[in-house]
Amino acid sequence: MKNILRERIDEALITLKEDKFLPQAVSANYQIDIPKSIAHGDYSSNVALLLAKPCSKSPRVIAETMRDILLKYETFEEVVVAGPGFLNFKISDRSLFTIIGEILELKNDFGCSTIGASKKVQIEFVSANPTGPLHVGHGRGAALGSALSSIYTACGFEVVKEYYVNDAGRQMDILAASVYLRMKEETGRESTYPSLCYQGDYVRRLAVDYLKSSTLNIRMEEFAFDEVELKGETDSDLDNLIGEIKAVLGLENFAQLKAYAASVITGSIREDLENFRVDFEEWYSEQKMHDFGLIDSVLSSLETKGHTYSRDKATWFRSAALGDEKDRVLIRENGAKTYFAADVAYHFEKFNKGFARLVNIWGADHHGYVARVRAALTALGCSEKRLEIILVQFASLIKNKEPVAMSTRSGEFVTLRELVEEVGVDAARFFYLMRRSDQHLEFDLDLAVSRSNENPVYYVQYAHARICSILESSEEYDPTVWQLEFGDVLSETSERKIAVLLARYPEVVISAMKTNEPHQITQYLREVAQEFHSYYNAHKILAEDTRLRNARLSLIYCIRQVLVNGLQLLDISAPRSM
């Protein structure tokens, strides 16, 4: 409907220019909004206010002149000039309720568009290190990336979802060392387990399973458990310990142990994500970039372009000259490449794959990485404007009105799997997507499992189930017999409000895509559910008059369809009964 309104307003402006009332060159980036009160009409525009200054005319005079032209269209029942020069529109019944016929015809495709023109978009999300299970913080990024992928697809983009597996570097060495030390304990030897190692029970399970593995290429005597001993509790001591373990095992055996641990944890992550209705087209391995020399190649390119220098036996990137707060280390003094070096190579690879848009979803604790990655892309000649980075704030859990303690350092954290087991996938996804990603989220576990109107996902799903019940009890109703004239009997204020609300859905989807904000969908669905419940409580859907009954059934059928379409974008079920 907004598109039709814009066409009518633009046509009126052309007429005013032809009549010499407005200058030919004048234009205005006007808005069409929905008034807070339906008493002010179905829609409102500020076009006359924006034209007043460049045309040297009173905004009310412009608005009144436009009103006289607009009233010639059957689209409008009423056009009112309000305040300093706003145009308020009341749409004619026949025009307003054409949305019912449109939804009945398009069904699941209502809300889809071709705005993306089949351009390729990569959305990279979760990308948690395979050093432990996914926790509730990862779940928020997973829900966000998954929903955005569906929204981009609905807008006509070709989407590739990617998980960047950080299966190389120091953290993976720490994981392998952690498993090694737990294996030492399991063989009955005394061991001091460092607090800087991974603490979760999953590490011990990895150790036990590895010891039982029939595919071990390492003989037990090669582990040389008694030769390795922790000297202290600092990062330097831990690095020395890792060096000792590598020495007694040999680099090949250490790599095998590390690969085993990474493989098991990555498999567990895949399983948790699949259960959370999240899948990926690509799982991109950091280790393969090392193996294939991709990182060396990109670092060489930076050096050739003059963007690196040596200091204190380390290799530095001149990122401060390209917008970062300071220069960054690419290769440490011991010859080890930093995570940043791998990130540079990874993003350079992304840009060479022909994506029109690249979307990265990172935890808020990675905010310091944004400037340095953009600086590196600029140095490599990439248009960093193609890269969009979304930072996701942490999600905290509330139970019995008290915060749930979580600490990844101690290994005592709530996993995504545990959350899903407690509240279900639907509630978890909906709650994660209720707020902007850059806002802190308090996840109320008690509310998420309650069967009450205060539970937002229950409230929306119940609206759908209630409509299904009504339609199933009306076996004689056939949505395919909808006629435009039926709209004439939908005269209630609430019915007009619902029609305007349903017509907004395609705009909400496009807006959610443009701003990378799936919470716009959840907020919209809650608004639709609220309008339906209010309408149901105030009006008899199964009216005695056949035309009125069919019209109202068609209206709620369309509400149901929009609820289904919105929930599908979020990959949340729409149960027919509750």
Image (cartoon, rainbow, N blue to C red):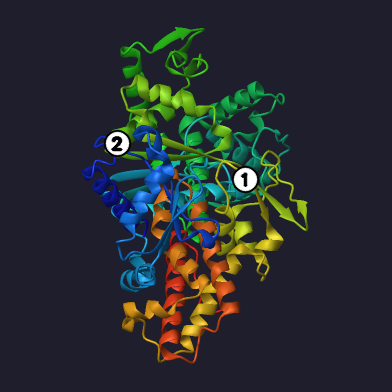
The image quadrant of residue 30 is: top left
Residue at the location (67% across, 41% down)? 199
Q: Position of residue 194 (x, y in %)?
A: 70, 33
- Determine if residue 479 is in view: yes
Residue at the location (71% across, 34% down)? 195
Q: Dot 2 corresponds to which residue?
A: 26
Instruction: Give the quadrant of the C terminus.
Output: bottom right
* Dot in front, 1 or 2: 2
Residue 49 vertical position relative to residue 400 in the rendered view, above or below: above
Left or right placement of residue 84 versus residue 181 in this view: left
Q: Amino acid at mark 1?
A: Val
Q: Position of residue 365 (x, y in %)?
A: 58, 34
Q: Nearer the viewer, residue 129 or 208?
A: 129
Q: Nearer the viewer, residue 412 or 264?
A: 412
How many marks the image carries: the answer is: 2
- Determine if residue 283 is in view: no
Does dot 2 land on a helix, a strand or a loop?
A: loop
Q: Nearer the viewer, residue 308 or 569?
A: 569
Q: Dot 1 corresponds to which residue?
A: 203
Judge the density around disc 2: few (<14), some (14-19), many (≥20) Cα neighbours within 10 Å.
few
Q: Position of residue 367 (x, y in %)?
A: 54, 31
Q: Amino acid at mark 2?
A: Val
Judge the density around disc 1: few (<14), some (14-19), many (≥20) Cα neighbours within 10 Å.
many
Left or right placement of residue 429 versus residue 305 in this view: right
Residue at the location (37% across, 31% down)? 385
Does dot 1 land on a helix, a strand or a loop?
A: helix
